[in-house]
Image: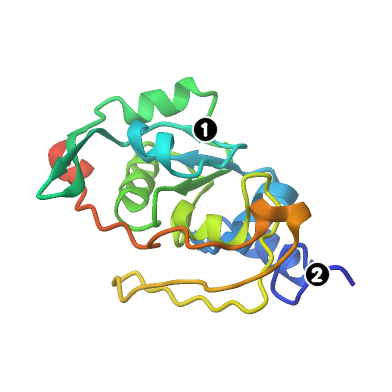
Amino acid sequence: QTWLPGKWPDPELVDYCGENFPDEGICSAEQAMCLMEDYGYTFLDVRSDPELNVHAVIRTGVHVPIINAKKLFRDGKVDYDQTVNREFVNQVKTKGITEDTKIIVCCSDGRQRAIMALMALDDAGFTNIVGMKGGVNMWTRIFDSKMVRRLQAEAKEVYSHEGDGCGIHGSGANFAKVDSVLFDLGPVQDEIDWIDWQEEMGQ
C-alpha cells in the first residue's frame, strides 16, 4: 500500500469522489487532487493578478480573476484597490471552458471569491462545478509546486466556512525534496475583505 487512508490515491477516496461529485459541491484539497487526476477536472483560479506574483499557483489550472485588483498598502498592511471583473463568465469561456467542463473553483481560501464564482457560473448554466475548501492556501500545505505531497510528520486540519480558522502543521526532513517540506506558508484564511461580485453586478 502506497497511500494513507482518506488521502489521494486511496481507492476508497477515488470511488467516493466519483460517486459524489459534482453533486456534493465543495471538496477538500485531497478530493480536489483526486478529481483532477482521476476524473479530469480543471482548476479555475479566480484570484487577482497581483496575488499570482507572490503566492502559489496550481500549475495545471487556468486563471480568470473574478475581482480585478491593484496591490497597495494601507496603514502598513497589504490591501487591494478592487473592481469587479464584469467579463468574468465570458473570459472563462475564452479559456476553452464550456458549461459541461468539469471545474474546481479556487481562490485564496475557498470562501469569498470562490463562492461568488460558483454562483456566477451556476447562474450562467455551468453544471460540473465544485469549490475547493481552503483554497490555494490549504492546497499548498498539502502539495508542493510539483504537485508532490509535502512531507509531514504530523498534520491536523481545522476549517469552517464561518471563519473560525484553519491550519496544518507538519515537519519533515529530506534534502532531496526540500520544496516538499512544510514550512510556514502564511495564514490560510484570507484577511482581505473582497467586494461582492453579485452585489456590484446588480444581481
The residue most toward the left is: 75
Decide: is 188 above or below 121.
below
**Residue of label 1:** 62
- Give how far across and how far down residue 197 sits, in percent: 22, 42
- Give how far across and how far down residue 13 sits, in percent: 71, 68
The one nearer the camera, 180 or 106, is 180
Decide: is 72 above or below 161.
above
Task: Quarter of the image for the N terminus: give it.
Answer: bottom right
Query: Residue at image x 72%, y 63%?
Result: 8
Rounded to the nearest whole Å, what is the CA distance between mark 1 and mark 2? 28 Å
**Given the image, on which type of amino acid does mark 2 rest?**
Trp
- Give how far across and how far down residue 138 sits, in percent: 49, 60
The residue most toward the top is: 94
Residue 84 in sight in this render: yes
The residue most toward the front is: 175
Answer with the quarter of the image where residue 71 lies. Answer: top left
Answer with the quarter of the image where residue 7 lies. Answer: bottom right
The one nearer the camera, 198 or 181, is 181
Helix or strand or loop: what does disc 1 sit on?
strand
**Given the image, on which type of amino acid does mark 1 rest?**
Val
Residue 202 in sight in this render: no
- Give how far across and how far down residue 185 sits, in percent: 47, 58
**Residue of label 2:** 3
- Number of residues whose C-alpha sits closer than 10 Å to that of mark 1, classed few (under 14), some (14–19) or many (20 or more): some
- Number of residues whose C-alpha sits closer than 10 Å to that of mark 2, classed few (under 14), some (14–19) or many (20 or more): few
